[in-house]
Amino acid sequence: MKTLTAGTPAPAFTLQNQNDEPVSLADFKGKKVLVYFYPKAMTPGCTVQACGLRDSKAELDALNVEVLGVSIDPVKRLPKFIERDNLNFTLLSDEDHAVAEQFGVWGEKKFTLRKFS
């Protein structure tokens, strides 16, 4: 798994958002974009992470940073996550994990001696 390093341009991508509309990284050209990946909407760890970003929105806005959350969840699950936790940023569906692979964040993980893909 190859991960990005500082100064490396992010891979170009287009994914469907929570409204089933295409969103491309190119749409944000010239802006700062925080692209974060989470395994599954509405799970405890992912909720804490998303709510932390939600609660930091004013600080991120002051720095002119756009937030894009990416998961392998289907599009239809994303609005539920946004509504349930009052999220204030865009979520994107990467069901085939192709974008996660491009960013080097998809692969086998180990947790308490168990392996996950």
Image (cartoon, helix red, strand yellow):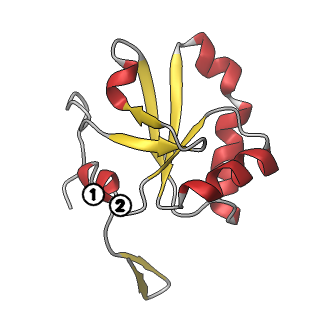
Q: Where does residue 93 sit, x and y in percent of width and height? A: 48, 52
Q: Nearer the viewer, residue 109 or 24?
A: 24
Q: Amino acid at mark 1?
A: Glu
Q: Nearer the viewer, residue 94 or 2?
A: 94
Mark 1 neighbour class, 10 Å CA radius: few under 14, some 14 to 19, many 20 or more: some
Q: Which residue is mark 2?
A: 97
Residue 33 image-quadrant placement: top left
Q: Which residue is mark 1?
A: 101
* Count of all numbered marks drawn on residues in the image: 2
- Who's the residue at 40% across and 44% down the image? 15
Q: Where does residue 112 sit, x and y in percent of width and height? A: 50, 84
- Who's the residue at 64% across and 61% down the image? 45
Q: Amino acid at mark 2?
A: His
Q: Is residue 102 above or below residue 72?
A: above
- Who's the residue at 69% across and 55% down the image? 47
Q: Are marks 2 and 1 in contact (CB under 8 Å)?
A: yes
Mark 2 neighbour class, 10 Å CA radius: few under 14, some 14 to 19, many 20 or more: some
Q: CA distance from mark 2 to mark 1?
A: 6 Å
Question: What secondary structure is found at the residue carrying circle 2?
Answer: loop
Q: Quadrant of the C terminus?
A: bottom left
- Who's the residue at 80% across and 51% down the image? 84
52 on left or right of 104 = right
